Image (cartoon, rainbow, N blue to C red):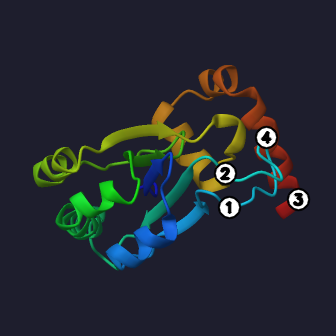
Amino acid sequence: MAKVNIDIRFEGAKISPGKLKALTVLPIESLVEYGEIAKTGRYKGKPSPYGLAFLKVDKPLNKDLNIALHTYLKKLISKKKEIKKIGVEEITIDVETPPLKESEFSFEQEILLKASKLDARIDVHTISDDEYIPSVSEFRSYIEKLNDEKLFNKLYPAKIEALKKKLVLHS
């Protein structure tokens, strides 16, 4: 099975990721602090007019991702009013899956209810095919599933070439 990545993203015009981290005592990472002088981008040299933070949801050893997500959402719900007060305007649960791989993941009903209580949006997307090169074993298993190498070649010619190069390099 493919690895599914989940992050919880916090955005807002005046959010302070540092305050959010202190309030929740969760491993929240600051991407942009409101008012901080931007080092790059369109606000370079100017105070940032917004804040952005994220929380990586890591799968506990031999357990379901729902367990970690449940723990984080429960904590965030308990601090919902305070979270809004420090500038969080939008919370997004971002689910990322790799292409060409079977990704078996589902949210338990309780997770969906908690996301709703938090007014969080859930985004599910696949990593771009251009950014992802499957391993040799992934390639072989996918070909077996398709049971038609010609179709795979027709659908993913760039991937075939990348894998051929990879095979040559590792031979």
Left or right of residue 3, residue 36 in this image: right
* Placement of 149 over or under 164, stated as above or below: above
For disc 1, the marked residue is 36
Residue 80 percent across, percent down from the top left: 23, 59
First in sequence: mark 2 vs mark 4: 4
Left or right of residue 159, residue 58 in this image: left
* Cα distance between the residues tagged 2 and 4: 10 Å
Residue type (three-letter) at the residue carrying disc 4: Arg
Which numbered circle lies on residue 48?
2
* Cα distance between the residues tagged 2 and 1: 5 Å
- Residue pictured at 44% horizontal, 71% vertical: 19
* Cα distance between the residues tagged 3 and 4: 41 Å
First in sequence: mark 1 vs mark 3: 1
Q: Residues within 10 Å of mark 3 (few under 14, many from 20)?
A: few
First in sequence: mark 2 vs mark 1: 1
* Cα distance between the residues tagged 3 and 2: 45 Å
- Residue pictured at 77% horizontal, 51% vertical: 46
Left or right of residue 75, residue 15 in this image: right
For disc 3, the marked residue is 169
* Cα distance between the residues tagged 1 and 3: 45 Å
- Residue pictured at 59% horizontal, 61% vertical: 33
For disc 4, the marked residue is 42
